[in-house]
Amino acid sequence: MAPQHPTRLAASLLFAGLLLSRAGLPQPVAEPPAPTPLVTSDVADAQKRPRTLAILPFKDHLVTPSDLFAPQGQVSRDNYAASLESVVLRSLEATPYVTVKPPARVREELSDDSALQAVGRAAQARYRLGLDLYLGMAAARAQENLKESAEMYRSIFQDVSDPKPYADAQFMLGVSLVDLGRVAEGHIALKDAFQIQADRRFRPNFFPPQVNTALANALVDHLSTADPLHPYGDNRRMHDLATRLGVSALVTGTVRGSPDGPVLHLAIFGVQRRIIEAEIRVSALDSSDRIDAFLSRWLACAPIGQAVASSRSSGKWRMDTSGSYALYARQPTRQDFHSVGFAAGVSYDLRPGFEWFGRVNMYTSLSDPYRDLLHSFNSVRVLGGVGFTLRRGPLRLFVRPGIDLHVLGSFVASTDADCKFLGLDHPLCDASTVSNLDQDLLAGLNLALGGQVHIGRDFFLALQGSASSYFLPFSGTDRLNYPLSAEIGLGYRL
């Protein structure tokens, strides 16, 4: 057998040694790769934006009829609402991708809003007037001012920022109604007042006995029927509040009594779905771990929302289409001619109670009974301006001053029979009787009054009437001017 080459022999021995070492010796186990934390970029379609939540002041519903008229210093009770607020706040602040507005900041934002401050001053003036009238034995006039004061306070979320002034107005409204003998209405008003400030107490013998009885009955009714998951109103009002605060969810809490001790009703309202997305009922005495677990489960299931700016703009755009009718107060025909057509408009809420709008109206004008309008014609009106709005439940009222640009079509009218039957070019046609505004542009001011009634979450029925006064061109408005119009249609809030 021929001797092997030294290099080949060395390689064979090295290979054999490696095989023996792997077969007979234990091999080190390879360490697994370091775990990579799950971040939002790992989740399909997730947006790496923090979810912004606001914690509303928790409500205390632990007062009972037995201590309703007890002096403040004689009733001792742990402040469960404040301590549970702190538990929820600490849990949310420790969670990544969550930005929390604590109750103190929520109160501050609402209190510092200049638009809300103006309404608050007006509400306080109404309350003082109503209180003076009540003390002056004029309960009928007092209740009108107190009711208006309470409505103003409700519109600016005074029950969130500082409930006492709102509750004062609502309680005094109920008291004045009871004094007037309108016991049922007074009961409802007092019950609503306890919804605003359920831990309210009163000095003994401050009110007449019948008022004290009405207060106790209203408290019992409130504690037995109030929804602990909606301490600040229905879903629509919660959505309006969340939009104003610029958050994607609201956290509410209500502490109520039970045979086993105080119980916390914790709820989370989601802006995107406009419903209570999660809720839990836990003992207020031992609730920290359960609250942490509840919030973790909700945050794990709820998608990371859109940017705060988009939640603030939600619902501010409105579009509608309407059937339209118009006539003119000044016209060259002996009797009115009617115009029918359709309109389309858009508006945007610049701030609560203030908007800008734009509309386009297209009309076909029909001949009058005397046929002074020689033939029907088409015209287009373009309107734009600002609006002032007032929202009350599903009803939204508006006043819209603006500018009206009116492009006329082939408008030809005459009261001369020869012009009608023989033609405008005939020698017998009196040219002085002919009004020809072919393609003229009229410009002036417009004022519209109307309202929108929401018939669903985003759809609404729109109704408005308007009037215009044209002043340009100076020589072209003496024959055709002052259009009056009415519109009815459907719209959608974006």
Image (cartoon, rainbow, N blue to C red):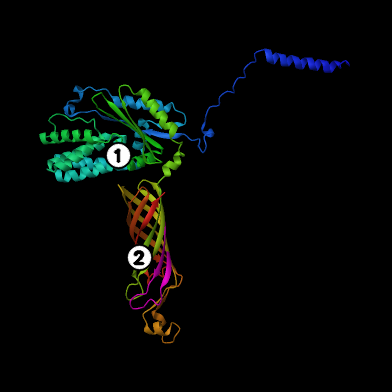
User: Between 489 and 277, which is closer to the camera in this rendering?
Assistant: 277
| Label 1 SS | loop
User: Which residue lies at the image location 12% right of the left edge and 30% below the top edge?
Assistant: 205
Looking at the image, the residue that sits furthest to the bottom is 428
Mark 1 = which residue?
Answer: 233
Q: Position of residue 181 (x, y in %)?
A: 11, 43
Q: Is residue 378 magenta?
A: yes
Q: Residue 203: x, y in percent?
A: 16, 29
Which of these two is toward me, 212 or 424?
212
- The answer to which image quadrant residue 224 occupies is top left
Is residue 32 on the magenta stretch? no
| Count of numbered circles in the view | 2
Residue 325's disc number: 2
Type of the residue with mark 2: Tyr
Does residue 335 appear anywhere in the picture? Answer: yes
Residue placed furthest toward the top:
25
Residue shown at the point (40%, 80%) measured from the top left: 432
Look at the image and tell me whether residue 133 can be seen. no
Q: Say which of 226 and 483 sits in front.
A: 226
Contact check, label 1 and label 2, Cβ < 8 Å? no
**Amino acid type indicated by mark 1:** Gly
Q: Is residue 449 above or below residue 31?
A: below
Distance from disc 1 to disc 2, alpha carbons, whole Å, reads: 40 Å
User: Could you tell me which residue is drawn at 86 percent across and 17 percent down?
Assistant: 5
